[in-house]
Image (cartoon, rainbow, N blue to C red):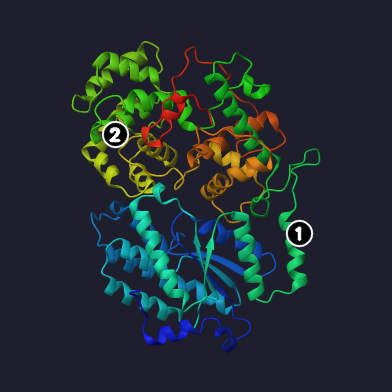
């Protein structure tokens, strides 16, 4: 490895396993979780802290952190949106220096006082991330090494009892080149640090096993009494019922994390039955497609978002029908999604012919849409409410504001900014920066753009729950164990195969494509609705007790076709359905 600390730090690091002999008995222990993105660091660190903290003083802390009114929060915002601070460009080495500064602030202000008070600290990321991302982004590594020396000096005599290097058995052809390079850098760093520190590689193949193994390791190394350990093991794995009249199936890996209610099992049953209906209709079967009266009588989206009628129209008739120039695809996608209504797109197409940014005139589009409204037509979908922009807006009708919003995006060269973005999260942040686009819409638009060839992000890396999904999560779980709602959705997605097996459900995937984060997010929203009738005793935030929309089958069979990059259209044509 190219990186070596100075002699003082090397000496301290080499003695990491013995350093507690020279410290006071009431000093807390430090455990670090490191590794590439999307390996479960945050989920596991928070879960371990939650479980270990049942009988011990412990705390979860992350680098750089996003706690309000801290240096870490400031750096987090700067990293994700420099325009918020009127900065157009920032040097990568400078950015890593700012990360180091936030680390030192957290070390001095929070972590060391906790350790001195006897609290065990579970730290999400270490200086390893600075080194790896510095190298990946072509920073001046000589500067980076000196910066890391500064962080190590801030730790003084405090060293990790263990660094858990989390990894997964990634299928190399399914990750992009940057991810492959990042994993390679992490692997080399781990091998080098393993010679000097108590670094433990963990392949996170099963979330429950990983959490159990880490907990056992921490308890053993911290000398937790055997009777105390056993006392807290059983409650962590018992099945918890949400009332006296219902019981859940066999224990789930998620039981120790989130204490599921009966609605959690319903979540998986709903997903499977909704997908069964999808395939029965596709095969041309006649009604009834299900014996479930709730699904038979009420409207629900498909288990897979891309299978819904509007998404199918967007993919086939908007994104991939016409010029594949980045500007044109972006323009068509956002224009369609602003209204999210097939009839509005047909109206504009009939009036202007091929929809094109080159020929776009906001005034002419406004005239056509205004005329449609005045004739009694609805131009917006009822799926979600588009914001008006608030009081004091200069626009008489909100569609004019949305046309101007799209025009602003195009003038800001958003199509190419999105194309150059390195993550879906960054695309989300860029879209979110526009007035009138909140978290929900920004995530939906980022997902829709990702159906095209403009971006090619994995749908297993980033998710933002909408209001309905948050209500569904609340109904499914009694506690959060410190996990955010986005992290809970990720845990659920990762456990899908295990959960279907546990419930003995034969789930028919989308021609081999597992449920993605966007699908699991949508399923929480649909489960919230479904549970209003299935489990009326389980209340959500809104207190809604009925489902408004009744099921009405579309008159025409949909010829299903998905983004070609998914590689499933050939399977559809071959007649395979799993």
Q: Residue at x 68, y 77 (%)?
A: 223
Q: Nearer the viewer, mark 2 or mark 1?
A: 1
Pick the residue in front: 56 or 384: 56
- Examine the image and state in which quarter residue 565 appears: top left
- Residue 77 visible to an observer of this rendering: no
Where is 460 relative to 162, above or below?
A: above
Residue 470 lies left or right of residue 2; in this view the side is right
Q: Residue at x 23, y 33 (%)?
A: 325
Which disc number belongs to residue 234? 1
Q: Which residue, as the protein is rendered here, is positioned at the far left?
A: 358
Local crowd size for mark 2, using a 10 Å CA cut-off: few (<14), some (14–19), many (≥20)? many
**Percent coordinates x, y for residue 8 in the rendering:** 41, 87
Where is 543 relative to 112, above or below?
A: above
Where is 110 relative to 278, above or below?
A: below
- Examine the image and state in which quarter residue 210 appears: bottom right
Q: Residue at x 43, y 32 (%)?
A: 568
**Percent coordinates x, y for residue 185 in the rendering:** 37, 64
Q: How many marks?
A: 2
- Examine the image and state in which quarter residue 430 appears: top left
**Percent coordinates x, y for residue 213 in the rendering:** 63, 64
Q: Earlier in the sequence, mark 2 or mark 1?
A: 1
Residue that label 2 marks: 330
- Residue 273 visible to an observer of this rendering: yes
Q: Secondary structure at mark 1?
A: helix
Q: Which residue, as the protein is rendered here, is positioned at the far bottom?
A: 22
Residue 464 lies left or right of residue 480; in this view the side is left
Q: Quadrant of the N terminus?
A: bottom left
Q: Residue at x 37, y 29 (%)?
A: 337
Local crowd size for mark 1, using a 10 Å CA cut-off: few (<14), some (14–19), many (≥20)? few
Q: Secondary structure at mark 2?
A: helix
Q: Which residue, as the protein is rendered here, is positioned at the far front?
A: 574
Residue 143 lies left or right of residue 235; in this view the side is left
């Amino acid at each position: 490895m190219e990186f070596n600390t100075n002699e003082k730090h090397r000496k301290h690091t080499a003695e990491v396993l013995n350093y507690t002999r020279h410290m006071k008995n009431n000093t807390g222990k430090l455990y670090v979780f490191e590794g590439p993105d999307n390996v479960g660091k945050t989920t596991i660190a928070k879960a371990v802290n939650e479980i270990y903290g049942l009988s011990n003083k412990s705390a979860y802390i992350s680098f750089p952190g996003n706690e309000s009114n801290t240096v870490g929060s400031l750096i987090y915002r700067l990293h994700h949106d420099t325009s918020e601070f009127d900065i157009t460009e920032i040097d990568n080495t400078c950015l890593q220096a700012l990360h180091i500064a936030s680390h030192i602030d957290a070390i001095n202000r929070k972590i060391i006082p906790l350790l001195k008070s006897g609290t065990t600290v579970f730290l999400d990321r270490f200086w390893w991330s600075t080194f790896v991302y510095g190298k990946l982004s072509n920073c001046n590594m000589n500067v980076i090494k000196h910066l890391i020396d500064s962080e190590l000096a801030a730790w003084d005599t405090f060293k990790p009892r263990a660094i858990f290097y989390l990894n997964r058995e990634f299928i190399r052809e399914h990750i992009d080149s940057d991810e492959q390079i990042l994993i390679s850098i992490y692997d080399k760093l781990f091998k080098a640090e393993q010679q000097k520190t108590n670094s433990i590689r963990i392949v996170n193949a099963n979330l429950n096993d990983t959490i159990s193994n880490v907990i056992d390791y921490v308890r053993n190394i911290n000398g937790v009494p055997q009777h105390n350990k056993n006392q807290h093991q059983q409650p962590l794995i018992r099945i918890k019922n949400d009332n006296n009249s219902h019981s859940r199936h066999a224990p789930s890996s998620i039981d120790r994390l989130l204490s599921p209610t009966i609605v959690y099992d319903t979540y998986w049953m709903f997903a499977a039955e909704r997908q069964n209906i999808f395939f029965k209709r596709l095969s041309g079967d006649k009604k009834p497609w299900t014996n479930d009266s709730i699904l038979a009588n009420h409207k629900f989206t498909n288990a897979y978002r891309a299978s819904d009628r509007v998404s199918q129209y967007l993919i086939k008739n908007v994104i991939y029908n016409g010029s594949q120039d980045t500007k044109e695809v972006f323009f068509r996608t956002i224009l369609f999604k602003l209204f999210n209504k097939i009839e509005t797109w047909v109206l504009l197409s009939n009036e202007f012919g091929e929809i094109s940014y080159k020929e776009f005139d906001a005034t002419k589009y406004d005239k056509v849409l205004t005329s449609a409204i005045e004739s009694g037509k609805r131009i917006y979908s009822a799926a979600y409410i588009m914001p008006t922009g608030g009081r004091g807006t200069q626009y008489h009708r909100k569609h004019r504001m949305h046309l101007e919003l799209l025009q602003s995006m195009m003038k800001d060269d958003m199509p190419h900014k999105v194309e150059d973005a390195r993550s879906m999260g960054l695309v989300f942040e860029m879209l979110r920066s526009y007035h009138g686009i909140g978290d929900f819409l920004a995530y939906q638009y980022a997902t829709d753009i990702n159906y095209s060839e403009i971006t090619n992000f994995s749908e297993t890396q980033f998710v933002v729950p909408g209001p309905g999904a948050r209500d569904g999560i609340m109904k499914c779980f009694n506690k959060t164990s410190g996990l955010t709602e986005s992290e809970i959705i990720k845990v659920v997605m990762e456990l899908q195969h295990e959960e279907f097996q546990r419930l003995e459900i034969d789930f028919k995937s989308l021609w081999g494509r597992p449920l993605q984060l966007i699908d699991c997010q949508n399923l929480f929203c649909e489960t919230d609705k479904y549970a209003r009738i299935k489990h009326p005793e389980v209340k959500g935030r809104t207190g809604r007790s009925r489902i408004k929309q009744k099921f009405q089958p579309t008159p025409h069979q949909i010829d299903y076709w998905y983004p070609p990059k998914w590689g499933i259209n050939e399977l559809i044509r071959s007649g395979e359905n799993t």
